[in-house]
């Protein structure tokens, strides 16, 4: 028979309460989005604007090795960029909770210490799914169509896998920066990270040294792998380097490496916060 508490009700396991605490954090985060939908609109505004600018304004001047359509080449990159920029929002939310004393309040409550970090991660993944859905509708409105059968669902798995890894970078940075204004400055890091990649231009068209940097950018591996899985003709452009020839492998490996580095850093930083 199960143990009973002082009220006569069955006691719950630590796992149950950890999951319950995590769900409460997720519900809190989603409630904030529900009450402030402008936050999601702001997160999606820049990628959608970039699609319109690069796809329609600059698209006629862009080249795709092999002669593919540039808009078809661009859209998978836009999905990747949306996932990549998400870590800025993660860092902003975490630093806001940290500086306003919300995290200290959580730490003083009888709740699982892992729930705050895990709940933030689950919330961001749910929001990422919504962002991908909206970006997909934008792509369809522009005439983009995947042609890889059900295999293209694997592309969304890789996109969310990348977002999962970047969540821990955002949590770690959010616990490191002193205020929300400083977190906004992380855009200066994210912008060159996405520009020096294969999101907008194939690395083969860049100068040799810059193309090498872009090819080894983890974002480039996910962009190349998703183009391959979406199966749009003329967009799965692979260079001669090892990293470009094994895009699918590295799209799965890079997030593992990033998670192994930044998840322990985020947990350690969270544990060091003053009560």
Image (cartoon, rainbow, N blue to C red):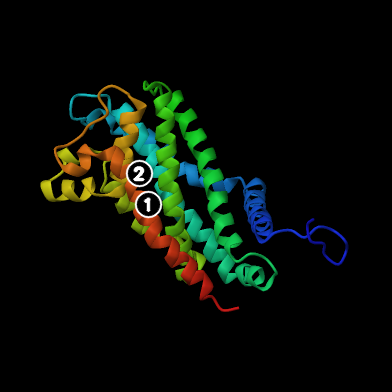
Determine whether, in the image, residue 87 is placed left or right of residue 228: right
Front-lying residue, 4 or 258 = 4
- Count the labels in the image: 2
Front-lying residue, 81 or 16 = 16
Determine whether, in the image, residue 239 is placed left or right of residue 88: left
Distance in Å between CA atoms under marks 1 and 2: 7 Å
Query: Which residue appears farthest toward the right when viewing the image?
Result: 7
Query: Which residue appears farthest toward the left when viewing the image?
Result: 208
Helix, strand or loop status at disc 2:
helix
Q: Residue at 44% x, 47% y: name it.
A: 163
Q: Position of residue 193 (x, y in %)?
A: 31, 52
From what the image shows, is residue 181 above or below residue 237? below
Q: Position of residue 198 (x, y in %)?
A: 26, 41
Do callouts 1 and 2 mark residues in contact (Cβ within 8 Å)?
Answer: yes
Residue denoted by label 2:
252
Q: Residue at 41% x, 33% y: name it.
A: 154
Q: Residue at 46% x, 30% y: name it.
A: 136
- For the N terminus, the quadrant is bottom right
Front-lying residue, 230 or 77 = 230
- Residue count near mark 1 (Cα–Cα under 10 Å), binned few <14, some 14–19, many ≥20: some
Helix, strand or loop status at disc 1:
helix
Any mark on residue 40, and which? none
Determine whether, in the image, residue 126 is placed left or right of residue 210: right
Residue denoted by label 1:
256
- Residue count near mark 2 (Cα–Cα under 10 Å), binned few <14, some 14–19, many ≥20: some
Query: Which residue appears farthest toward the front when viewing the image?
Result: 1
Tell me if residue 199 can be seen. no
Where is residue 262, by image quadrant?
Answer: bottom left
Q: Position of residue 184 (x, y in %)?
A: 45, 60
From what the image shows, is residue 92 above or below residue 101? above
């Amino acid at each position: 028979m199960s143990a009973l508490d002082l009220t006569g009700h069955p006691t719950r396991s630590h796992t149950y309460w950890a999951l319950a605490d995590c769900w409460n954090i997720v519900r809190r985060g989603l409630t904030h989005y529900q009450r402030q939908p402008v936050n999601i609109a702001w997160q999606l505004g820049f990628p959608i604007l970039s699609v319109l600018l690069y796809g329609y304004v600059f698209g006629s001047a862009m080249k795709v090795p092999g002669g593919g359509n540039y808009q078809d080449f661009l859209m998978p990159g836009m999905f990747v960029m949306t996932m990549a920029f998400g870590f800025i929002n993660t860092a902003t939310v975490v630093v806001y909770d940290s500086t306003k004393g919300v995290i200290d309040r959580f730490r003083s409550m009888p709740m699982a210490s892992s729930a705050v970090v895990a709940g933030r991660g689950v919330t961001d993944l749910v929001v990422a799914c919504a962002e991908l859905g909206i970006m997909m509708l934008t792509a369809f409105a522009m005439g983009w169509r995947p042609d890889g059968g059900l295999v293209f669902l694997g592309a969304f798995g890789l996109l969310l896998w990348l977002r999962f890894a970047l969540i821990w970078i955002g949590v770690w940075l959010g616990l490191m920066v002193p205020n929300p204004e400083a977190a906004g400055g992380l855009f200066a890091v994210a912008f060159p990270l996405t520009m020096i990649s294969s999101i907008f231009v194939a690395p083969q068209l860049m100068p040799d040294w810059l193309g090498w940097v872009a090819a080894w950018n983890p974002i480039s591996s996910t962009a190349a792998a998703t183009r391959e899985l979406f199966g749009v003709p003329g967009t799965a452009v692979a260079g001669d380097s090892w990293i470009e020839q094994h895009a699918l492998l590295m799209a799965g490996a890079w997030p593992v490496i990033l998670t192994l580095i930044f998840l322990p850093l985020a947990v350690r930083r969270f544990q060091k916060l003053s009560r």
